[in-house]
Image (cartoon, rainbow, N blue to C red):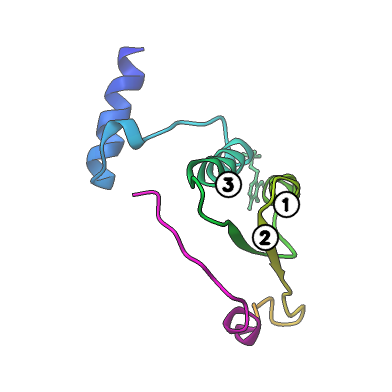
Amino acid sequence: MRMVQASRKRVASLLSCSPEEVVFTSGGSEANNFALKGAFFARGDRPAHIITTQIEHPSILVPCEFLERQGARVTYLPVDAPASSIPMMSVASSPVTPFSLA
Ligand SMILES: Cc1ncc(COP(=O)(O)O)c(C=O)c1O
């Protein structure tokens, strides 16, 4: 346990944040779930609009579908297959209400 706490402090120092803001997860799927659901449920009364792409990993898409059922608006941007790029016009035309947890 002391090693985890020491590691948390070290990572926090590298990221210039407090140790309480550092969460270790088992991997990408848990981290993605944690970030999406954590941000959604921490937002209070503010409306939620998540912007993602149609080709994300299931650990993004499945929580997004869950959060849609919880009332979040989710925009799944298309991706140009040949260039594997996000059409910038679809980003520009997507209304965004950014919020910060800070
Ligand atoms: C973009 C992306 N997100 C999440 C994951 C899932 O990561 P993990 O296997 O650590 O849960 C992967 C795995 O390939 C990935 O490519």
Residue 36, horizontal then vertical, whole percent: 58, 46
Residue type (three-letter) at the residue carrying disc 2: Arg
Residue type (three-letter) at the residue carrying disc 3: Leu
Q: Earlier in the sequence, mark 1 or mark 3?
A: 3
Q: Answer whether labels 1 and 3 touch (C-beta < 8 Å).
A: no
Image mark for residue 36: 3
66 left or right of 10 in image: right
SS label for mark 3: helix
Q: Pick the residue in front: 35 or 67.
A: 67
Q: Pick the residue in front: 83 or 72.
A: 72
Say if the magenta span includes residue 80: no
Q: Earlier in the sequence, mark 2 or mark 3?
A: 3
Marks 1/2: CA–CA distance? 6 Å
SS label for mark 2: strand
Query: Residue lying farthest bottom?
Result: 89
The residue drawn where x is 74% and y is 74% is 78
Q: Answer whether labels 1 and 2 touch (C-beta < 8 Å).
A: yes
Q: Pick the residue in front: 30 or 91.
A: 91
Q: Nearer the viewer, mark 2 or mark 3?
A: 2
Q: Is residue 20 above or below residue 74?
A: above
Residue 6, horizontal then vertical, whole percent: 27, 23
Say if the magenta span includes residue 98: yes
User: Which span is picked out in magenta?
Assistant: 87-102
Residue 51, horizontal then vertical, whole percent: 61, 64
Marks 1/3: CA–CA distance? 12 Å
Q: How many marks?
A: 3
Q: Which residue is mark 2?
A: 73
Q: Which residue is mark 1?
A: 68
The residue drawn where x is 58% and y is 75% is 95
Marks 2/3: CA–CA distance? 13 Å
